[in-house]
Amino acid sequence: MRLPGQFPPAGASHTGHALTRRLAVKGSGQEERLQADLKAITRIAPPAVYAGAFGRWQDALRDAVRLEATTRGPLAVGLGNPSPFEVGLTLHHTYGVPYLPGSALKGLALRAARQNGVPAEAITAIFGDTTSAGFVTFWDGWLVPGQTEILQLDTITVHHPDYYGDGGEWPTDFDDPNPVAFLSVRPGVRFELRLSGPEEWAAYAARLLEWGLTHLGLGGKTNAGYGSFAVEREKTPAEREAERRAAEQAERERQAAEEAKKFEGRAHILRQRVAGMNLGRVKAELPPLLGQIRELPVPLRRELLERLLKRLQSDDRTKGEKKLLGQVRAALEEAR
């Protein structure tokens, strides 16, 4: 029985306190009042001290691989946790905010590894087994401070309670649905995740976790669209260096292609000269031809030299001329 004046949740220090200490156990006929109480709980802001705790957590794990995960739909983690209203929710014991348990994140990454065919020895190295610990530690994912409207009132509707209860009755269209109110995390809520361990292994595990959060989902009701995330993964120094080199290479290739366009007309003329050159006078014609080819940008130079070498190697008059062929090969080596 509810005590008078127990709600609104005055005096609750945070959401978890309100749920575990300020909410009466659900009783028959109190469904509407329970929903009103839960809706009031969704308006409780995180305590002011939480931002400081989050900052200390970041400092302690500054060298760990970082991901930021944003809910794309509702999130229901800990539905089976003990609760006064039948359906549980995972909240931080001290600060009362939702968080992502490291054990759940590790299990999700393990599912991702198995579904993507990661070798068994790599799985053991990352996650460990019954005889040894893994290289990577999956820390709890913390709620990013400064967000409001984190939780929402949600409903699970059991359409065939007798069938799902003891199985004594077959489900029919005449059953009385039983809506159950509960709290879930809203879409658009951001969490920060950290993985620590040897850089290469932690980075690899982070990619597995990113795939799992994006494609499999975390928590309950994932088949109904719950638990999906949009993930931004912080690159490791090695990955950033590889991306920088790839970008530089792509820029060099783009510039080379732009430069090649300016010489396309001259290259076309030289292609015709290579195709129609008099191989009986190749010793006289080759030096000036090589000089003109060397004036072209590298991609076109390489193409013309390959054409020229193929032409000389395919004709009986020149395929044995090692000195001539050597000149063309040397020019081609310079163009690589």
Image (tube, helix red, strand yellow):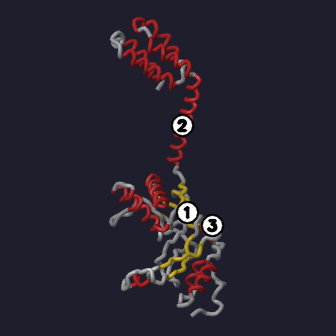
Task: Residue at 56% x, 19% y: name it.
Answer: 265
Task: Residue at 65% x, 76% y: name it.
Answer: 43
The image quarter containing residue 185 is bottom right
Find residue 75 and report its horizontal and vertical position in percent.
53, 69
Residue 19 lies left or right of residue 166; in this view the side is right
Q: Secondary structure at mark 2?
A: helix
Residue 118 lies left or right of residue 146; in this view the side is left
Going by the numbered disc 2, the residue's amino acid type is Ala
Task: Residue at 65% x, 74% y: name it.
Answer: 45
Along the polypeptide, which appears first: circle 3 or circle 1?
1
Question: Mark 2 or mark 1: which is in front?
Answer: 1
Quadrant (top left, top right, bottom left, bottom right) of the N terminus: bottom right
Q: What residue sits right under mark 2 in the picture?
A: 250
Q: What residue sits right under mark 1 in the picture?
A: 72
Find residue 200 and report its horizontal and vertical position in percent.
45, 52
Whether residue 22 can be seen here: no
- On residue 145, the disc is 3
Along the polypeptide, which appears first: circle 3 or circle 2?
3
Find residue 244 and report its horizontal and vertical position in percent.
55, 42
Going by the numbered disc 1, the residue's amino acid type is Arg
Going by the numbered disc 3, the residue's amino acid type is Pro
Q: CA distance from mark 2 to mark 1?
A: 34 Å
Task: Residue at 51% x, 23% y: name it.
Answer: 300
Q: Residues within 10 Å of mark 1 (few under 14, many from 20)?
A: many
The image quarter containing residue 174 is bottom left
Whether residue 77 can be seen here: yes
Question: Mark 3 or mark 2: which is in front?
Answer: 2
| CB contact under 8 Å: marks 3 and 2 | no
